[in-house]
Amino acid sequence: MESCLHKLSLLLLLLVAMPCALAQTEVGFYSTSCPKAESIVQDTVKKHVLNNSAIAPGLLRMVFHDCFVHGCDASILIDGPNAEKTAGPNLLLRGYEVIDDAKTQLEAACPGVVSCADILALAARDSTVEVGGLTYSVPTGRRDGRVSLASDTANLPSFVDSVTVQKKKFADVGLSAKDLVTLVGGHTVGTVACQFISYRLYNFRSSGGPDPTIDPAFLPILQSLCPQNGDGNKRIALDYGSGDKFDHSIFKNVESNRGILESDQSLWQDSTTKNLVQRYIGVGGFDGLKLNIEFGKAMIRMTNIGMKTGTDGEIRKVCSAIN
């Protein structure tokens, strides 16, 4: 009997210990190996955002584009003629210099310890804070990938994707419809080039006219911002009227048929995503504060996609090249 109880106790201890043993990342992973790791990244992001506010949404978009290809392994940072950063959806990404700056400092303080993947995940969090978002704890311990191919970016979510396509692309990487809507909340900051919305204003789906979902009172405003045959590189705010502050106004614009991207506005056409949009603007108990809280949770889930940990991958010496 005593032997059986002993074995049962060992089994229970094993079951209790398993979650820790199986944990791939943890908050404070560098607390001993590089105690100043997170503060170095935070200070670097703050310095760059103060100099150029466009860096904040740039870093958010960069981590998004990294995690949807090979998982969150910093493959987006690798240079090369056929690397991910050369693909069409990634050509306008910005913020590489921030990651490089932080990595240089971290290599001086703790050589070969902090991964580029973790720097990117931390920088995305810190950039959100710099534009008014709430902070959240980022589990770290990721390692860097060794593969970066432009051809692997074909399934990145696109500004022309329907809700059905968007939900499938998110589901394919283990994210829910709620994650989709919540992460679209990141469009509350940043800009988009006119070339990516002009088709909605003048020749939507080869109709010769505008997208009928655009608020008729808003259409001339958009057309004045992005004139027909005008400068396609001109940039306008993704969140009209509040493009430099992290808040929930992006969803108020979607409700009013004033979403800038077709993919954002389409969230209002699907019952599931529409319900979530409504909740983030205050219907059903959610609000801007709730968006802030849920955004951090969704970012953690997203930056856990396809992580490399343990002995998988490597810790790059420089983020733009494999060792």
Image: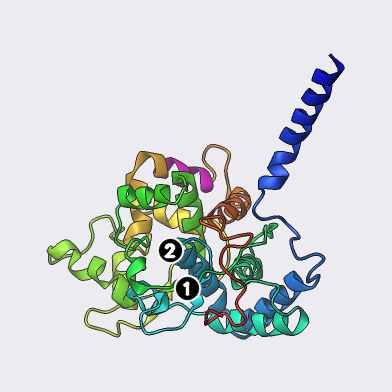
Q: Nearer the viewer, residue 221 or 297?
A: 297
Q: Main secondary structure of the magenta part?
A: helix
In-image side of 276 versus 158 (left or right): right
Q: Measuring 22% from the left and 79% from the top, which residue is drawn there?
A: 228
Q: Which residue is mark 2?
A: 69
Q: Measuring 74% from the left and 76% from the top, which residue is drawn there?
A: 40
Q: Horizontal and vertical percent for residue 200?
A: 25, 66
Q: Which residue is mark 1?
A: 76
User: As drawn, which residue projects farthest toward the front?
Assistant: 3
Q: Horizontal and vertical percent for residue 272?
A: 40, 40
Q: Magenta segment range?
A: 274-281
- Whether the magenta-drawn stretch holds residue 198 is answered as no
Rate crowding at label 2 as few (under 14), some (14 to 19) or many (20 or more) other CA atoms within 10 Å: many
Distance of mark 2 from mark 1, alpha carbons?
8 Å
Q: Is residue 239 visible?
A: no
**Amino acid bearing label 2:** Val
